Image (spheres, rainbow, N blue to C red):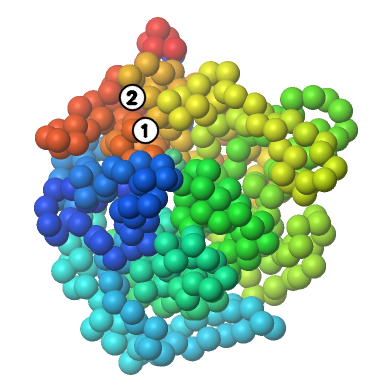
């Protein structure tokens, strides 16, 4: 079988800063973020909210990047996706640095920096970190790969968010992270600065990785997934999601200032939701969950339409929102949903989640047609070109990864060829095993597995398969 994709199709792999950088030297460690604090917190470890694994024992991409990037190149990838660690660049509070702020009503819709402020930011930034990122980026470019850069993949600097105090009491904590409008302003400044400093190296930009996950896992599911700050309050979750939409919009414009011709987009994590029954209640309920998870953010980011009280009716239109150049899809799983029908609990808490059929180590349900389905759906709704920015499997024993990769790419090919959906690229998650947030090192997503003691990288079986696919060569059906 040959899985031939269009000539200009982008094949890549993805990683993120917090999940891979630390582990190789003192300099590789970045201690000033909320996630760093969260996973080191003794009570969190004791209560089993986080694993107790520590990111400073991780991959060490910070120093070993040459090997990892060369491995991506070896696989025939023509691009790599990575992110920048905000807390590494600005470990100290820079709120005092002035920015011009534009409002529409009460909403922040623009943040720009006068020349002097940009200079002050340069002066306050961690120059060594900036130079080191430039070295990494230069190596990527010299290897002939396109650089896809995500501005923000989750950790916030500690001067903006104290996840422990906010976990203890979200009302009284002072540094509220994305719940606070101040963070939108600081993100606007950060985006302006980063795009000014790195535009020369970056080919494609993503503003924020999975705002939907930041909001839902952090503010709706409490301690369930170990996400910071582990709050249960759906209104706060959507206040956070609104702030992230505003922050995305501002950073989009700020990146464009220095990157007029480059694509800038946003990526979310849509799932394929399947009702377990055919009755009307279940189907309405699944529609609601899908609306909250797959559509709420994109309605805001794409059309400027906000549904602040979650009744599926838009109650606010913000004119200053600019549609992104592309929508990124991070697709992992099918979720089978039932409706409990309990009258005394809020509607959304009636969710009944069924276990996986074809399970990953994470107990996520492998369902390749879901990738085709969500790509079609999001294109029909939002009419933006698409990238698959993440798709991968936690599979420590390397039993299912090859089949997972091939089957998802078969579906993607159909999406492009038969459905005529403009999907421009596919990034597999992940290039190397990485620190899986609250789950630490237990989940192995890497095409290259990593021995965390020796830092040795070892190819999984899927490496040779991905290489063949990227090079347009025949693959053996036996892998499936
Ligand atoms: C995140 C990654 C994470 C992956 C697997 C995505 O939601 O962007 O950081 O490692 O899922 O859980």
Picture quadrant where residue 452 is located: top left
The percent coordinates of residue 262 (x first, y second) are 43, 61
- Quarter of image, res 58: top left
Ligand 1 located in image quadrant: top left
Q: Position of residue 127 (x, y in %)?
A: 19, 73
Identify the residue shown where x is 77% and y is 49%: 346
Which image quarter holds the N terminus?
A: top left
The residue to which callout 2 is attached is 396
Which of the two labelled residues, at mark 2 and mark 1, occupies the earlier sequence position?
A: 2
Q: Answer yes or no: do the residues labelled 2 and 1 have beta carbons within 8 Å?
A: yes
Secondary structure found at label 1: loop
Which residue lies most toward the right here? 280
Q: Is residue 317 left or right of residue 225?
A: right
Is the C terminus in the top left, top right, bottom left or bottom right quadrant? top left
- The image's mark for residue 443 is 1
Residue sitting at 40 percent across and 7 percent down?
478
Quarter location, residue 133: bottom left
């Amino acid at each position: 079988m040959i899985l031939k994709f269009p000539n200009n199709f982008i094949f890549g792999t993805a990683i993120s800063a917090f999940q891979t950088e630390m582990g190789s030297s003192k300099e590789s460690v970045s201690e000033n973020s909320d996630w760093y604090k969260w996973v080191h917190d003794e009570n969190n470890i004791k209560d089993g909210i986080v694993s107790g694994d520590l990111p400073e024992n991780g991959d060490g991409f910070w120093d070993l990047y040459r090997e990892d990037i060369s491995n991506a190149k070896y696989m025939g990838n023509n691009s790599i996706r990575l992110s920048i660690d905000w807390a590494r660049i600005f470990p100290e509070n820079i709120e005092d640095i002035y920015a011009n702020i534009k409002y529409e009503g009460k909403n922040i819709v623009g943040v720009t920096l006068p020349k002097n402020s940009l200079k002050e930011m340069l002066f306050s930034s961690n120059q060594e970190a900036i130079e080191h990122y430039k070295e990494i980026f230069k190596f990527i470019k010299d290897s002939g790969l396109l650089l896809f850069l995500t501005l923000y993949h989750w950790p916030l600097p500690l001067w903006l968010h104290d996840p422990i105090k906010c976990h203890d009491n979200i009302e009284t904590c002072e540094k509220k992270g994305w719940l606070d409008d101040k963070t939108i302003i600081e993100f606007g400044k950060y985006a302006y600065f980063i795009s000014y400093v790195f535009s020369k190296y970056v080919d494609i930009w993503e503003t924020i990785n999975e705002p939907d996950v930041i909001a839902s896992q952090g503010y709706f599911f409490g301690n369930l997934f170990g996400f910071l700050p582990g709050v249960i309050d759906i209104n706060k979750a959507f206040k956070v999601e609104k702030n992230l939409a505003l922050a995305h919009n501002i950073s989009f414009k700020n990146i464009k200032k220095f990157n007029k011709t480059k694509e800038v987009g946003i990526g979310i994590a849509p799932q394929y939701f399947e009702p377990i029954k055919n009755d009307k209640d279940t189907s309405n309920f699944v529609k609601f969950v899908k609306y909250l998870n797959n559509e709420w953010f994109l309605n805001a980011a794409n059309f400027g339409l906000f549904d602040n009280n979650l009744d599926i009716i838009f109650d606010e239109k913000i004119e200053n929102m600019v549609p992104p150049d592309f929508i990124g899809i991070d697709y992992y799983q099918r979720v089978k949903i039932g409706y409990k029908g309990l009258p005394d609990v809020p509607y959304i808490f009636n969710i009944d989640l069924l276990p996986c059929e074809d399970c990953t180590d994470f107990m996520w349900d492998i369902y390749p047609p879901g990738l085709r389905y969500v790509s079609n759906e999001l294109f029909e709704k939002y009419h933006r070109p698409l990238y698959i920015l993440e798709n991968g499997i936690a599979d420590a024993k390397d039993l299912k990864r090859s089949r997972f990769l091939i089957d998802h790419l078969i579906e993607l090919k159909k999406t492009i060829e038969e459905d005529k959906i403009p999907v421009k690229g596919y990034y597999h998650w992940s290039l190397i095993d990485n620190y899986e947030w609250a789950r630490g090192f237990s989940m192995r997503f890497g095409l290259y597995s990593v021995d965390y003691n020796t830092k040795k990288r070892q190819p999984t079986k899927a490496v040779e398969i991905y290489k063949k696919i990227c090079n347009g060569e025949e693959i053996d059906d036996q892998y499936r």
